[in-house]
Image: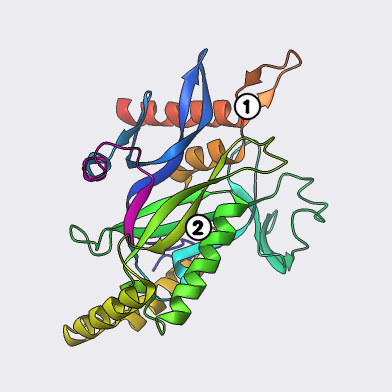
Amino acid sequence: MIKGLAITPPVIGRISIGRVVERNGKRLPEKDDQFTLTTQVQTREGWTLHPLDEQLRRASDGQKLRSIPVRMLFNDPDLNLRADYSLFDRTTGRPRCVGNGESCRRMGEGGVERLPCPGPDACTFAMGDCKAYARLNVLIGDGEDDAMGTFVLRTTSFNTIRTLAARLQYFSAVSGGRLSCMPLELKLRGKSTTLSHRTAIFYVDLVVRAGMTLEAAIKTAQERDEQRRAAGLDQDALDEAARQGFANGAFEDLAEDVPAVVEEFFPPEQSAAGQEVASPVITGLRGRLEGQMQRQVQA
């Protein structure tokens, strides 16, 4: 195994509740009130839709996609949802420091250093640019097409991170550690607060599938666990392999993931005239990546 490279779950698509739109020649993030499933292919018009997106919309009678049937790949909640405080370099977009409020891994001149992490509010190194950032990997449906091909949901929403972390821990506890066998669904919820000026903000929740009680979902998980064990599937070994893979690298995100991450972390800035302008991080980084792709094609 190559040292320094985090081995992460295979990703075959993305789950988002927003999109990046081009306005006046600038690419700007725009929030949405529904889920969108995309492939990992991005064009100038945006991310291309995954076939499952249309399939799920048909199943919901053409309504907005606000719930997605899912299963977890791992029994360990922390393997499915990795949440931390992250600081990205404003020039390159690469991670500079990743911590959990207790300790952090920080890129220095001599390599990666392990240091205490005071959290984003008290960190003098981050200067306010550190944010909570999480990645959730899920199987759509029961993983019929690809038993280990996941869709990834990236988020910086505290509401989403806190809700998903709690739900995963609770479902793991009540199912006797059979989290990967629980029939669940991602659900989009709305709320308004004083800080949102009474307008709705959306976050992602995790619940048992529609039409099922918690008790029925637990019974289904028990039956599925027995079937998988009888077939020779070793879930504990899978969890351990994933744990070692994550620990193999200092930072999880790869270079090709950087544009999507930066677009999430650096929203539009306000000009002196009060107009939205694209972050120079997004514009500059995207230009450099597109230039690299053009040179590779020409070669």
**Is there any visible trace of residue 287 in the rendered image?**
yes
- Circle 1: is it few (<14), some (14-19), or many (20+) Cα within 10 Å? some
Left-right relation of 13 to 261: left
**Is there any visible trace of residue 133 in the rendered image?**
no
Quadrant location of residue 62?
A: top left
Is residue 57 part of the magenta span, yes or no? Answer: yes
Left-right relation of 120 to 86: right
Element marked by disc 1: helix
Please state the horizontal and vertical placement of residue 18, each as a whole percent of the image. 47, 36
Element marked by disc 2: loop
Question: Which region of the structure is painted magenta?
Answer: 56-70
The residue that label 1 is drawn on is: 280
Marks 1 and 2 in Cβ contact (< 8 Å): no
The residue nearer to you, when weighing 175 against 29, is 175
Quadrant location of residue 186?
A: bottom left
CA distance separating discs 1 and 2: 24 Å
Is residue 38 part of the magenta span, yes or no? Answer: no
The residue nearer to you, when weighing 164 against 262, is 164
The tag on residue 252 is: 2
The residue at the point 50 percent across, 74 percent down is 170
Colouring convention used in this rendered image of the protein: rainbow
